Amino acid sequence: MERSLRGIAGVFIIISVLLAHFVDLRWLWFTVFVGANLLQSAFTDWCPMMTILKKCGVK
């Protein structure tokens, strides 16, 4: 589960940086959102993406 989470977060960050470079700088706010979620999950041990992955059956 954690490997999937790190992979998804990495893909989200790479995509948002590419979108910011080629489309609009405001896509960097998505990068900030992903980073903030990772930071809060370090303190609370809860991540919205983990909840979604569990519902999708990822173990």
Image (cartoon, helix red, strand yellow):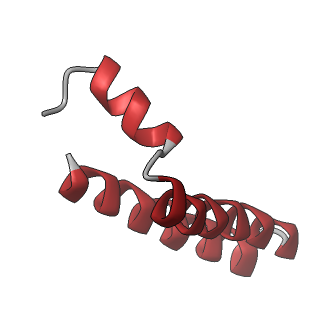
17 versus 48 height, above or below = below
The residue positioned 53% from the left and 69% from the top of the image is 13
**Residue 28 as seen in the image, left or right of residue 7:** right
Kindly indicate the quadrant of the structure image that contains residue 29. Answer: bottom right
Task: Check the picture and name the quadrant holding the C terminus.
Answer: top left
Q: Is residue 3 left or right of residue 33?
A: left
State the residue at coordinates (47%, 65%).
42
Q: Which residue is at the far front?
A: 44
Q: Is residue 28 left or right of residue 36?
A: right
Q: Residue 33 placed where, x, y %?
A: 70, 60
Judge whether 8 appears above or below 16 on screen.
above
- Observer-nearest of 57 and 24: 57
Q: Quadrant of residue 35?
A: bottom right
Residue 25 versus residue 23: which sits nearer the camera? 25
Quadrant of the drawing holding the N terminus = top left
Residue lying farthest bottom? 21
Is 11 situated left or right of 29 in this image? Answer: left
Residue at 44%, 61% in the rendered image: 9
Residue 16 drawn at (x, y percent):
63, 66
For the residue pair 14 and 51, the one nearer the viewer reads as: 51
Q: Residue at x 71, y 75 (%)?
A: 22
Q: Position of residue 39 (x, y in %)?
A: 57, 69
Q: Position of residue 12 (x, y in %)?
A: 51, 60
Q: How many marks?
A: 0
